Amino acid sequence: MKLVMKSARATVSAAALAVALTGGLYIASTSPAAAQIGVDLWVREAPPPPRHEVVPPPPEPGHIWVGGHWAWHDRWDWEEGHYAAPPHPHAHWIPGHWRTGHDGRHMWVEGHWR
């Protein structure tokens, strides 16, 4: 039990330090398991509208386009889209998106294969 408590205190301390350093972010853990692995970043400022991307032809048959998105790195940066190979033949890509919390803060939900 002491090990868990120390870990939780360390996570809270790290989150408090990150908030103090970034100023523009809230950091919150979604679950005890997530607290062990990492934290979610909540941004006060809404991301800009998505950019239009010209999708080039795939480099190989079967590759899937993963669209670009705005990412927060102490400011909004556009991360270009790219092609990715599915992990198995029937996989399909679920795009990432910015989720807005009830308090108006924004969190990136990573895209993933299903």
Image (cartoon, helix red, strand yellow):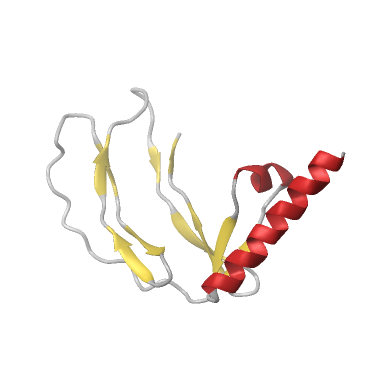
- Residue at the farthest top position: 89
Q: Nearer the viewer, residue 41 or 111?
A: 41
Q: Position of residue 107 (x, y in %)?
A: 53, 62
Q: Position of residue 84 (x, y in %)?
A: 28, 37
Figure check: 61 above or below 38: above
Residue drawn where x is 40% and y is 49% of the image: 95
Quarter of the N terminus within the rendering: top right
Residue drawn where x is 59% and y is 48% of the image: 38
Q: Nearer the viewer, residue 55 or 39?
A: 39
Q: Is residue 27 left or right of residue 77?
A: right
Figure check: 3 above or below 10: above
Figure check: 50 above or below 85: below
Q: Position of residue 26 (x, y in %)?
A: 60, 68
Residue drawn where x is 23% and y is 34% of the image: 63
- Residue at the farthest right position: 1
Answer with the quarter of the image where residue 69 lies.
bottom left
Q: Nearer the viewer, residue 33 or 51?
A: 33
Answer with the quarter of the image where residue 103 lies.
bottom right
Q: Position of residue 66 (x, y in %)?
A: 30, 46
Quarter of the C terminus within the rendering: top left
Answer with the quarter of the image where residue 14 lies.
bottom right
Residue drawn where x is 61% and y is 43% of the image: 37
